[in-house]
Image: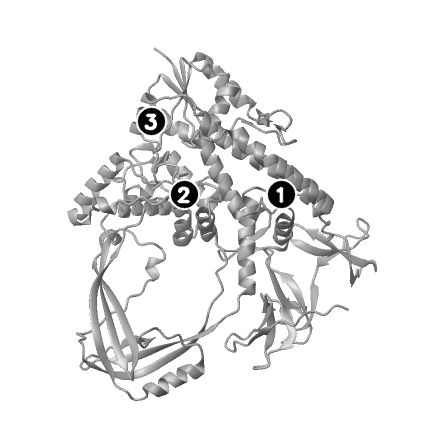
Amino acid sequence: MPKYLVIVESPAKVKTIKKFLGSNYEVLASNGHVRDLPKSRMGIDIEHGYEPKYITIRGKGDILAALRKAEKKADKVYLATDPDREGEAISWHLAEALKLDEKKQNRITFNEITKSAVKESLKHARSIDMNLVDAQQTRRILDRMVGYKISPLLWSKVKCGLSAGRVQSVALRIIGDREDEINAFIPQEYWTLDADLSMEGERKTLTARFYGKDKKIAISSKEQMDQILSEIGQAPFVVEDVKKGERIKKQPLPFTTSTLQQEAANALNFSTQKTMRIAQQLYEGVDLKGSGTVGLITYLRTDSTRISEEADRAAAEYIESQYGNQYLAGESGKRDGSKKIQDAHEAIRPSDIRRIPAEVKESLSRDQFRLYQLIWRRFAASRMAPAKYETTLVKISAAGYRFQITASRVAFDGFMSVYTESGDEKEETNVLHGNIEKGMELKLVKFDPKQHFTQPPAHYTEASLVRALEEQGIGRPSTYAPTITTIIARRYVAKENKNLYMTELGEVVNNIMKEAFPSIVDVTFTANMESLLDSVEEGIVPWKTVVENFYPDLDEAVQEAEKNLEKVTIADEVSDVICEECGRNMVIKYGPHGRFLACPGFPDCRNTKPYLEKIGVKCPLCGKEVVLRKTKKGRKYYGCEAGSECDFMSWQKPVTEKCPQCGSYMVEKGNRLVCADTSCGYVCAKPEETGG
C-alpha cells in the first residue's frame, strides 16, 4: 500500500485531520514557518536583484529532521498549510527546506476542516502557486526594508528599542490625525425642542420633535429658542398629515475578518488579537462530545462574503425547517459586499449550520461559545429574509411651525429573529398610542427645550481602527490584529476603556516618520502598495519590479534623515529639581513609560522620581502649579502638582486667561481658546505669541 505524508502548520490540526484519513496517511505539523530572513541582518541582497537570503529558524532543526525522515518513507507529500498567501509561502519554504521532488509534492487547501472538505482537497491537489508565494515574499521584503532601515535611525535619534513598520506607522499616523482633530475641535451650541402632546381619551403622551417650517430650522441659541416659544404661545397643535409607509431592513452580510473583529469588539468586548486566537481554535478543531475533534468554522482570514453553493443549500434547508419558508431569503437577498475581494475562500461561517450553538455549548469554553454563537447567528441571518417595519410620520402644525412624530413597529422580524447587530440593539422606536388622524387637535402638556453642544470625533477603538484600515485599503485580513497589537506593545498607543490614545513616545515616533518619511506614512501610498501586492498575486506585476521601485527612494530618504533630523534629546535635559539624597540637579530621562527624573550620579545614587512638567498655569481649584501628568498606560493629561490632595484634571491644556463670560478657566483647542465649562460655550482666538 502507498504511504502518504500530510504536512500542516499547527499541531492542533494534526489531531483533527488524522481521524478523517486512513492508516496510510501520516499527519505532521511544521509549527508555522520553518525558514525566514535572519534576525541579525536585513537578509536581502540589494546588489544582486534583491534576492532574499532565507535561513532555518532557530529551534526548527528537530522538526525539519522529523519531517525529512517521514518524507523519505512517503510516496506522496501533501502540503496542507492555510489557504492564503502566508500558507502558500509556508508550503514553498517546506518544499525548499525538505528538497521535495516536484513530482512528489502536492499542494492541497481546504476552507474548513471537515471530513468531506479534507477528502475533497486530496482529489484536487496542485502545484505551489508561485504568484501567491511572490506576493507574500514581496510584503515580507518591503516590511523588512522599512524595519531594518528606519528602526536604527530611531535608535540613534530617540532611543534604543523603538521600531518602525510599513503598516504600523500608517496606523499610528491615523490615530495621531484623529487626536489632532479632537484637540482642535470647537463645540457648537445647538438646541432641540420637544413638545409632549396628549390625545383625547389617551393617558400616554406623544413626543413631537420641532422641525421648522417648510424647511428644517436649526436652533443655535437660547435667544432663538425663546423667540420660537413666544411665537407659538398658546397656539393649538393640529395634525396636518399622517403618512404610513414600509421600511425594509436588509439582512447582514456574513462575516469577513474585519467585520468579525469589529462585531466581536462591540458585542463581546474582545480585542482583535483575542478574536483571532479564539477563531483559530474554532477553525482548527474542538473536541465535541460524541463527535471527536471537529472544525466548527471556516477559514478565519478572508475579505470575501461569498458562500459556497453547498453551504447555501444547507442553510436554506435548515431555515425552512426551523422557521418556515417566509423566513428564507430570496435570490435578491443574497448580497455580495466588497468591491475588491480576494475571492480565494468564503466568508467566515459555521462548517455545518445544523451544529447549533446550544448543542455544542458544553464542549466549548465560555469565550469559544460566545464567538461561535456570534458567527452562527450572523451566517444564519445572512441567508434569511429582510425585516419589515411599518412606519408612520405625523406632521403637526402650531403657529406656522411644524413638529413631527416618527414611529415604527416591526411588521415582520425576518433575520432579526436570529440576530441583531450590537448597534441596532440601541435603536429606539416611538410608539403611537391610539388612532391619530388628520385634522385632529392635540393638547400641549409641556415643552422640553434642551441645550446641546456638538461632540468631537470619537477616539479610535480597535474595532473602528480596523474599519478605517479596511476602508482605506491599508493591510489585509491577516495584518489587522498584529498591527494593532504591535503599536500597543511598543507603547506608542495606550488602550483605556476600549479607546486608543497616542502616548508621548508615539507622538515622537509619529512626528519623525511624518517629517522624514512622508511617503511611508502616507495612507494613499500604502493603499497603492497593497494594490501592487494584489497585482503580484494575480501574476500581472513581477515582484522584483515592486521592490526595485521602492528601495532606492527609501534608501535616499534614510540618508537624508540621518543628515538632517535633529536628535530628540529628551534623555539628558537638566531640571531644577534637586536630588534630596545627594544634592545634584536631577536630569530628565526617557523610559518605556515616558519621561522621568533620575539622579545623574548613577550608579552611586539611584534616586528616581516622576517628572512633572510645569506649564506656567495656576491650579483653578487650589492655586498650586498645573503639571503635565500621564495615566498608567501613558495617556497625557493636566493635573495639579498637589496630586491626590487636589481633584483638578483636564485632558486639554489649561491657560492663564479666564473666561470673560463665566470666570471659569480656559483650555487650548488648536488655534482657539475654549471655556472649560461646556454649558458656557465661550470661544475666542488664541493670542499670537510674541517673540522677544
Q: Quadrant of the C terminus?
A: bottom right
Q: Please name whichever residue, 217 or 289, is drawn nearer the observer in this view of the structure.
A: 217
Write down the quadrant of residue 320 in the picture: top left
- What distance separates the C-alpha of mark 3 from that of mark 1? 41 Å
Residue 234 placement (x, y as % from top left): 29, 89
Q: Please name whichever residue, 595 or 548, is drawn nearer the observer in this view of the structure.
A: 548
Residue 258 placement (x, y as % from top left): 41, 45
Residue 507 placement (x, y as % from top left): 62, 54
Q: Is residue 155 shown above or below 649?
A: above
Q: Quadrant of the N terminus?
A: top left
Q: Please name whichever residue, 463 or 690, is drawn nearer the observer in this view of the structure.
A: 690
Amino acid marked by disc 2: Thr
Q: Earlier in the sequence, mark 3 or mark 1?
A: 3
Report whether 558 appears left or right of 71.
Answer: right
Q: Give SS at disc 1.
A: loop
Residue found at x 32% / y 36%: 288
For disc 2, the neighbor class at 10 Å (few under 14, some 14 to 19, many from 20) is many
Asked whether the residues under the numbered discs 2 and 3 touch, taking CB atoms below 8 Å apart as contact, a structural biologist would say: no
Q: Earlier in the sequence, mark 2 or mark 3?
A: 3
Query: Which residue is under mark 2?
Result: 257
Report whether 608 appears left or right of 413.
Answer: right
- Is residue 648 in sight in this rendering? no
Q: Earlier in the sequence, mark 1 or mark 2?
A: 1
Amino acid marked by disc 1: Ser
Query: Which residue is under mark 3?
Result: 118
Residue 324 placement (x, y as % from top left): 16, 47
Q: Give SS at disc 3.
A: helix
Amino acid marked by disc 3: Val
For disc 3, the neighbor class at 10 Å (few under 14, some 14 to 19, many from 20) is some
Query: Which residue is under mark 1?
Result: 163
Mark toward the viewer: 3 or 1 = 1
How is the model colour-coded?
Answer: one colour
